[in-house]
Amino acid sequence: MKILRGLSIIALLAFLITAVSCGEDEEPQQTVEDTEDPVVTITAPADGSTISVLDATTSVTITYSVTDDVEIGSVVVNFDGTQLEEVTSFVDFLNYSGQVVKDDVSDGEYTITVIATDLAGNSTTASSTFTKVTANPYTPLANEVFYMSFEGNYTELVTEEDATQEGTPGFAGEGKEGDNAYAGAADSYITFPTTDLQNTEMTASFFMKLDVTADRAGILAMSPEDAENPDAQNVRTSGFRFFREASGDLQIFKLNFGTGDAEVWLDGGDAAKLDPTDDVWHHFAFVIEATMARVYIDGILVAQNEEHIGMDLTGCDLLSIGSGAPRFTGWGHMSDNSYIDELRIFNKALTDAELEAASGVEILGEQEFDPNPQLTPVDGADATELMRMTFDTDFTTSGTVTPTVTTVGSPTVSGAAYVGAADSYITMPATDLMKTNISVSFWVNVNNTPDRAGIIVIGPEDTGNADYPDVQNNRTSGFRFFREAGTRGQRYKLNVGNGTADSWADGGEYAEIPDDVNEMRHIAFTISDTLAQVYMNGILVTQSSIGGLDWTGCDIMSFGSGAPRFTEWGHLADESTFDDLRVYEGVLTSTQVAGLKSDGPQ
C-alpha cells in the first residue's frame, strides 16, 4: 500500500508539471515584423573621389557602416566584383561599422559595393566609384618642408612619407582644393616624426571647415613628452600648440609656444573667433620667428607678439595633426572632427606677400578698424540724443538733459575740443542719463601717455574696498569705457555691470588705435538689455552678451578719466584730445553710427 501511495504522488506531480508546461507552450509567441531594408553608408573612398599617390600601387582602406531596425544578418564587401569579406557575426546586431583593406591597387577606376541583408531577407546595396592615379613627384615651394593635400591618402608629399594613423581618421569627400580633405573622428589623429621640422623659425598654413562635435580640440601640436603626466600631457616650455576652445557659441583659436624656460601665448580675443556652424572653409596661418609671432585667420592678422626670445624645440620629436594627443591633452584638447586641407609648413617666417603666394589667400595683415568678419551689427530702435558737449568754447552741455559740469584739476578747451591733462577730468550728475538702454558717441585723437586711462564712467562708489576712497573698482553696476596698451596701440574696452556681476566687450586688436595714428577717430558704444557693442570709425569691432545694465549706486558721470569711481587698475586721467561727446537713450543703429562718423570731425 505504501508503494502504491508513493506511485500515486509521483504520478500527480508529473501531471502538474505537464499541465504547467502545456500552459506555457500555449502562450502566443510575439514576433516583430521586419519590412524595412538595412541602411548602408560607404564613408571611404568617397564616391567620385581620386586617390593620388606617388607609388604605382597602393592600399585602399574601405570604411562603411550598416544599420537595421531589427537585426543585421550579413554584410558582403566587393571590390570591382570580387568579394573582399563577408561578416555574419555582430556584437551589436542593429549597428555595424566595418573597415577592410584592399592591397595592390594600381591606376584605374574601381567600384566598391557593400551589400547588407537582414534576417528577414531585406537587402540593400551601396556603391562607391573612385579613381586611383600615380601622381608626379611633388615639387616643394620655396622653403616648404611639409605638404599634405589629403587626396585620399595621408602621405606627406615633400618627403613622400606616410603618416601614422591613430584611431579611425577619414576623408571628407570634398576639399578646399582637389577632391578630398582630412576628416577628423573621435579619438583619432595622424602623426609624423619631426626630422625635417626642427626649425626655430617656421610658418604653418592650412584650411579648415569646422565641426563643433567637440567644443575644444587640438589642431596642430609639436610638443615634448610629459613623462610625469602620461595621461594628461602638458609641457609647454618647448614646441608649439595650435588649438581651439568654446567662447559662447563661437570657437576661439589660440597659439602657444615654448621658449625653453617659459611660454608665449597669442590670443586674439574676439578677432580670433569663428562660428563653427557656418560650413565655410577658413584659412589659418601662424608664423614664428626670432622675436615676432603672428596668427592669421582668413588673411587677417588677429594676434601678434613682438617680445619673445624665440621658440625652443627640446624634446619635440612628434607632430600631431587633428588632435592635441598625445603630447597636449592636459586641458582636454583632444581630437578635432573638422575637415583639414592643404597643410603646409615652411622652415622660414614667411612675409605677408610670401604667405599670400603660398596659400592663394589675400593677406590683409594689420587692417586698422576692419570689422571682425564674424560680427554683424545687432540694431535696436533708433536712439534719441539726450545730451551733447561740442567743446566749442567751454564745457557747456546741451540737449534735453543739461547737467551742470564740475571740473577737477585743469582740463581745458582748445581748438574747439576737450584737451585732457594729468589728474584732470570733468564730472556731472548722471541721474537723467541713466537709461535702461544707453549709447555714447565721441571723437578722440589719442595721446598714449599715459599708456592706460579711463574715458567715460558712470559707476557706483566702492565703499566696500579696504582702501576706500583711494582705490575704487566696484563693477557690479554702471559702465566703464577705457583704454590700455595693446599689441600695436591703445586698445579700447567696455565693462558693464548687471547688478550682481560684470561683462566685458573686448575686441582685441580690432579695437586698437595704432600708436602712429595722429588724427581724430570716431568711437561709439551701445548697451541694450542683452548686448554691449563697440564701434570704431563706424565699424563694429566687438560685441558681448550681457545680463542687462543696473544703475544701483550710480549718481555721477566722469569724462576724461576713470576717477573718481574706477581707479584701482590705474585708469586715471586721459591726456588725449576729445570732441563732440553725445549720450543717447536707446541703442544706436549701425546706420546712425555710420552717420555720426561721416558727419563729425575729420
Image (spheres, rainbow, N blue to C red):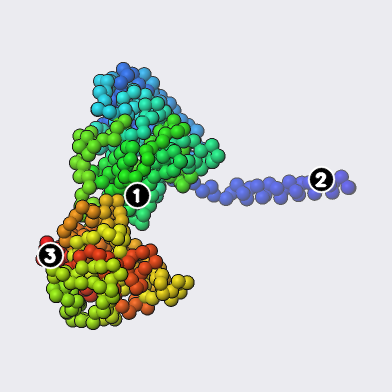
Q: Residues within 10 Å of mark 1 (few under 14, many from 20)?
A: many
With respect to residue 562, does 9 lie above or below?
A: above
Q: Residues within 10 Å of mark 2 (few under 14, many from 20)?
A: few
Badge 2 or badge 1: first in the primary sequence: 2
With respect to residue 489, does 173 lie above or below?
A: above
CB atoms at circles 2 and 1 under 8 Å apart? no
At x 54%, y 41%, the residue is 229
- From the image, state whether disc 3 or disc 2 is nearer to you: 3
Label disc, if present, on residue 325 of the rendered structure: none
Residue under label 3: 601
Q: Is residue 365 visible to us here?
A: yes
At x 44%, y 30%, the residue is 317
The image shows residue 88 at horizontal and vertical percentages of 47, 31
Judged left or right of residue 87, residue 201 is left
The image shows residue 428 at horizontal and vertical percentages of 27, 79
Badge 3 or badge 1: first in the primary sequence: 1
Q: Measure the alpha-carbon separation of dots 2 and 1.
A: 92 Å
Residue under label 2: 7
Depth check: 256 or 48 in front? 256
Q: Measure the alpha-carbon separation of dots 3 and 1.
A: 34 Å
Badge 3 or badge 2: first in the primary sequence: 2
- Check disc 3 and report its element: helix, strand or loop: loop
Depth check: 346 or 280 in front? 346
